[in-house]
Amino acid sequence: MGVDASTRRFSVGRAQTLALAVSLGIASGCAQIGPSTIVRDRFDYTVSVSESWKRQMLLNVIKIRYGDAPIFLEVASIINQYSLEAELNAALGWSFPPAGHEQRIGGTGRYYDRPTVSYNLLTGEKFARSMMAPIPPPTVMAMIEGGYPADIVLRLMVKSVNGIRNQAGLYNRSVAADPGFYPLLDELRRVQESGAMSFRLKATEQGEALVLVFRPQASPDLAEDAGKVRRILGLREGLEQYRVVYGSAASGDDEIALLTRSLLEILTDIASSVEVPPEHVAEARVGTTMESRGEGFRPPLVRISYSGDEPADAYAAAPYRDGWFSISDRDYPSKRIFSFLMFIMTLTETGGKQGAPVMTISAGG
């Protein structure tokens, strides 16, 4: 029997309807690619950049401990391009008189996810500005004014206050703090928590000057704490404001001189207390970890341990020298200081016209 015209029209019409439905379905799905990827991509890339940043910082601390050169790669941009391609084809065939008929419908689809990450190597002048230049005193004071504990900020970021030296770790050599340094930190912490001191910029003939302000307090205890700070630093009694400058010694009794560290000095201090395997010391690959005990010493701010295998419960871990160095996720004080360290690094990046890392995602259909 032959295929009449009505049958041919029905077959062709059914194929066209099916092709139109599939095409509309593909077009609808393609239109939703962009919005549906925003939440996922933003979260995933945030987590990935954060984890890589922690690992890079930890690895550089370990490299300094072993006498190796730190290398920093900045994420300059993240570009991700999505593409969805679809192709639909259909074929109908028959003969007259009929010897047979054939109907074929086929399609192909392709989905691409092409992430591209660009890095900038921190070298040369920018490395010198970011890593080797002393941290400006206004940055130190801004951290305290922003709510970070004064004793932690000064313990990490300064070498001395009015000539009173902080303890320091230099590879495998520890230097004790002067007798007045830790009492000064304790008193400043109490005054800070009471709200009895603040920092502000004051206009002078030479421009703007950073000043420390002791607010008048009715409480005898707070007044005594502020008095102890003045006596330790050799400041004049009765003043409420004192200039804060960079330097190793104050030029007068109305001035506070901060000799600040560079970020590289901070990393070196933290690296000096990293635990290393005894066999590495025996093979002269690294120096011994000096014990920081006794008067003039306080325990390390960050505890970094070593293990032969990758730790299962680590806040940050980095492979090095056929083993793993890590900060435990159960060590909250170390995690807090390490996060603070990364925040300090963002504040010391003063040398580029480049902005923050840029993420560009093309998600068109």
Image (cartoon, rainbow, N blue to C red):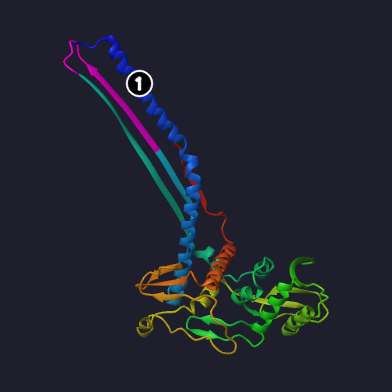
Quadrant location of the N terminus? Answer: top left
Tell me residue 17's x, y (percent). Answer: 37, 22
Tell me residue 62's x, y (percent). Answer: 44, 73
Q: Residue at x 27, y 22 (%)?
A: 91
Q: Residue at x 46, y 65 (%)?
A: 56
Q: Which residue is mark 1?
A: 16
Q: Residues within 10 Å of mark 1 (few under 14, many from 20)?
A: few
Quarter occupied by residue 131: bottom right
Q: Main secondary structure of the magenta part?
A: strand
Tell me residue 109's x, y (percent). Answer: 34, 36
Q: Nearer the viewer, residue 233 or 298?
A: 298
Tell me residue 249's x, y (percent). Answer: 69, 81
Quadrant location of the C terminus? Answer: top left
Q: Is residue 17 left or right of residue 292?
A: left
- What is the magenta range? 84-100
121 versus 196 height, above or below = above
The stretch drawn in magenta includes residue 93: yes
* Callout count: 1
315 versus 2 height, above or below = below
Q: Residue furthest bottom?
A: 294
| Dot 1 amino acid type | Gln
Q: Is residue 115 left or right of residue 99?
A: right
Secondary structure under badge 1?
A: helix
Q: Nearer the viewer, residue 43 or 155?
A: 43
The stretch drawn in magenta includes residue 155: no
Quarter occupied by residue 227: bottom right
Q: Residue at x 52, y 50 (%)?
A: 358
Answer whether residue 269 is visible to the viewer in this image: yes
